[in-house]
Image: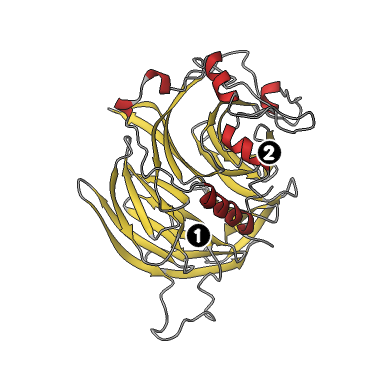
Amino acid sequence: MDYNTRKSLCTFMDEERKAKQSPPRLSFKSFEQISDRDLNYSHSRSSSTAAGMYSLMPPPSPDSPWTLSPLQTPSPSVLYHCIASLHRHEGIIYSIAVSRGTVYTGSESSRIRAWRQPDCTERGYIKANCGEVRAILAYGNMLFTSHKDCKIRMWNVTASENFRAKKITTMPRNSSIFLFNWSSGQQHRDCVSCMGYYHAEGLLYTGSWDKTVKAWRVSDGKCVDSFLAHEDSVNAIVINQEDGCVFTCSSDGSVKIWRRVYDQSSHTLTMTLKFQPSPVNALALSTSHSFCFLYSGSSDGFINFWEKEKMSSRFNHGGFLQGHRFAVLSLVAIEKLIFSGSEDTTIRIWRREEGSYYHECLAVLDAHRGPVRCLAACLEVDKLMVMGFLVYSAGLDQTFKLWRVKVLPDEKNVCMEGTGRSDKMRITEYEMSPVLSPSWVEKKRQGNPT
């Protein structure tokens, strides 16, 4: 089942709308209102709770692919709990961005909503009047949004006590009030699905379902380069801020690396990473002065990763992370952690072992009642001390959630997941049976989602 394609996504959305006749208007819990039983600590799930959850599901048939799995997480190395859960009638949330203590969400409605960290109270919204907001990117006081009209808007945001946003420009600008100039080649011809920003040069990169990538100079809003990047829809873009390399992935099953030609605006393809035929839906880059890892999530449920060689700058395939049962739709890398959201309704938290290709699955969050469409994460800092991580998730169940995650120091003899080039992968029973939302499992078994 592939939710990467627009057709299957729309089918799921329609069925979700029919299934939910009267959803609650607003479901919200602040951190102070969370009781002890609401805290999903990895070592505190009881057997009685598991029995109660299992009772919601019909007994599996002998030939059913669905198996029950333990609700406790496989490692005591992480503590997590959901501190806010919001459900609104504005439709599916397609994108999340975090900057300067404010979280932005874009959805099927034309409104871009702003939320305060870390309690997730609403600060205000921007009404764009140009259709659904597919992608959001925030950097400093700049906010970039893509819309149904295949254009990009740039906003200047003031997120003090009173939230204010002023539109700076629209990219591209119409060449004439009366003529919609498609022949200029500046405008995307289909949905703008992803964006990336290269800070040093002030370049905004946009990827589209029209298979192209465009580079925009933010200072004047001009398109400085446009190139056919893939044979199918471009689904994600990430930028290496150290050297300006552009990474793109597509439904054609490939990940490509592009580099801007020196002293020019054009870009050249330097490497194609194609390890599997499955569509690639998400990318994440984990970098520091000593390492650079690229992660890609695909529709077969695997997360492939590559390491950059220091001398040659080539990316060598290091292995893959196995755990999700269905398509990986979203990825975020921060520090040595990787957060992955999947069609199987769960979020997995992975940690890479220092100096190794091994990745440990720290926790599985039974997050939503539908595929986890987008993720965002940031450090939680209090008085210059890092307290942990804040993770924001949105699913096709029209729910927006905030998680507080605290990772404990590495422990020896932990159960590792993943493969290395010269090491054998260890697959446990838990890894083959990820936690699944009972309501989602029941729908899948009845054949409702297609």
CA distance separating discs 1 and 2? 41 Å
**Position of 38 relative to 48 (above/below):** below
Residue 354 visible in the current orientation: no
The image's mark for residue 445 is: 2
- How dense is the environment of label 2, judged by Cα within 10 Å: few (below 14), some, or many (20 and up)? some
Q: Is residue 42 found left or right of 380 in the rendered image? A: right
Residue 170, by quadrant, is bottom left
Between 16 and 233, the one nearer to me in the picture: 16
Instruction: Name which of mark 1 and mark 2 comes first in the sequence.
Output: 1
- How dense is the environment of label 1, judged by Cα within 10 Å: few (below 14), some, or many (20 and up)? many
> Mark 1 or mark 2, which is nearer to you?
2
Q: Secondary structure at mark 2?
A: helix
User: Percent position (x, y) of residue 152?
Assistant: 43, 64
**Position of 383 relative to 17 (above/below):** above
Q: Amino acid at mark 2?
A: Arg
Q: Amino acid at mark 1?
A: Tyr
**Position of 343 relative to 415 (above/below):** below
Between 96 and 265, the one nearer to me in the picture: 96
At x 55%, y 71%, the residue is 189
Q: Secondary structure at mark 1?
A: strand
**Position of 226 relative to 395 (above/below):** below
At x 65%, y 35%, the residue is 324
| Residue at mark 1 | 205
Q: Is residue 41 found left or right of 318 in the rendered image? A: left
Q: Is residue 443 found left or right of 89 in the rendered image? A: right
At x 39%, y 47%, the residue is 88
Between 60 and 213, the one nearer to me in the picture: 60
